[in-house]
Image: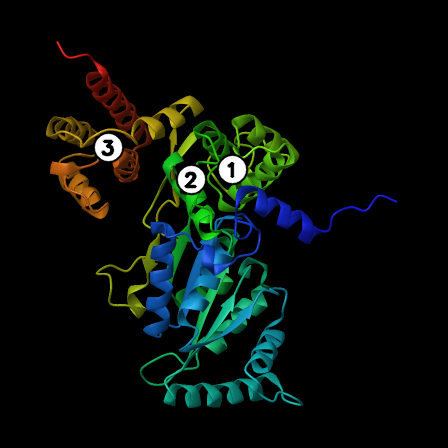
Amino acid sequence: MIELPTTQEHQAVFESHFGFRETPFGVAPDPRFFYSHPVYLDGLAALVHGIQSKKGCMLVTGDMGTGKTILLRRLMSLLNARVHFVFVSNSHLTSYGLTELMMESLGLNNKGRNRLEMIQGLNDYLIAQLKTGRTVVLLIDEAQKLSEAALEGLCELSNLATDTEKLLQIVLVGQPDLMTKLNKSSLRRIKQRIAIHHRLYPLQTLSEIDQYIRHRLQIAGYDGPEIFTEEAVEAIWHYSEGTPRLINALCDTALAMACAVNRKKVSRYMLMRAAGDLLLEQGSEAAKVGAAEPGLLRTKTPALRINQERSETNGVNPSVSDGPEVVIIRLRPSERVWLSRIATKGPAVSGQFFERMTHAATEAMGPTADRILGDQISALGESRHAFPQGKLADLILRVSREILNETMRTRFQRKMMHEIATLKASESAPDR
């Protein structure tokens, strides 16, 4: 009888072949692999702020595989010393079952108690925790699966408060369907209690995906030569649409293929085979993960929204559903690769380039363009005098999302691609 290797044996061979300390692209939401990208750091900062400031109810939304659960795990590991977390992933619970689970998780007696008695007991416990300086946080993952009755029941838990602060902090985490559900008039009570909303998006550029892969390899203890070729990273971008879960699956499958044929470098061909094994096609996952259509480049609206009635950090009062969630710019796949690759190399951008960029932006959005461009440059931690070409793609995306008219937005994008091409052509021309 043929004995097949165990999972542990296979993993040991895999890790030994590449020199990994552990598997770099596992499926578990290990907080050690948390990727310090602005969209995740902003989400983490928003939740930490909300919990420490006792905002009460917070919301995180994002498409499948965009990193919601690992964000929660990182939050828990960061605040574990001062916060008692109750993590709920069974979102099919009823309102009564949710309260009962909280009582059990906190070690409170709930035998023979009805829901009102349990809530009173929970209130007494929360007050006692407040006096000791500890905070209790209810984290609900996959919250889009909660019934309307369960969501409405959260209002009673949210009402537990002193005269000055909320006793229980509630974090709802789910797919965009959750916002659709919360927009129903029957759930306006719980929606009005949401003080902070953060939206997660897929990674947007080749450089972001390349850095993500390097980050996970580094955490896994790898310190050797490049494993994924530039063409392989390109293929990962096309097949994954920037979704971290799909990036992990593609990388893990391709690494296993390389190991099987005793190779230590992953090629584009291996990635194409891995995508085939995973039943992925270029751009086909867009509908599943809520990304843009194939051949489109996505830009993002500001991720953090704070309800002014419960926070002093804004001077306006936006609702959590105001404004478009995603701005789409139509580009062919070759243009997407070209824009990301061409804008990642070279010296600082010249002042003349920014003059032309300002002119193009002014045509698209009016006299406020120069101020908006300056704000976006500052947001990237740079100045016009020494702006690196490596951040041009990010800057163009940031400015594009400020252009509300789709035709003008597309025109601005095309002009900037032409300007980058001109810039590169002038750099590569021989001196005369």
Determine which quarter of the picture holds residue 95. bottom right
Q: Is 397 rendered above or below residue 52? A: above
What is the spatial separation of the Cα atoms under label 2 and label 1, in whole angstroms? 10 Å
Residue drawn at x 39%, y 56% is 198
Q: Position of residue 135 (x, y in %)?
A: 41, 79
Q: Position of residue 96 (x, y in %)?
A: 61, 77
Q: Is 64 rendered above or below residue 312? A: above
Q: Is 154 rendered above or below residue 213? A: below
Q: Is residue 269 left or right of residue 182?
A: right
Q: Is residue 302 left or right of residue 354?
A: right
The image quadrant where one finds the C terminus is top left
What is the spatial separation of the Cα atoms under label 3 and label 1, in whole angstroms? 25 Å
Give the mark nearer the N terminus: 3 vs 1: 1
Say which residue label 2 marks: 209
- Neighbour class for label 3 at 10 Å: few (<14), some, many (≥20)? some
Say which residue label 1 marks: 240
Query: Do we see residue 9 in this rendering?
Result: yes
Give the mark nearer the N terminus: 3 vs 2: 2
Give the amino acid type for the residue marked by disc 1 in the picture: Ser
Q: How many marks?
A: 3
Cβ–Cβ under 8 Å for marks 2 and 1: yes
Say which residue label 3 marks: 389
Query: Do we see residue 202 in this rendering?
Result: no
The image quadrant where one finds the N terminus is top right
Q: SS at mark 3?
A: helix
- Neighbour class for label 2 at 10 Å: few (<14), some, many (≥20)? many
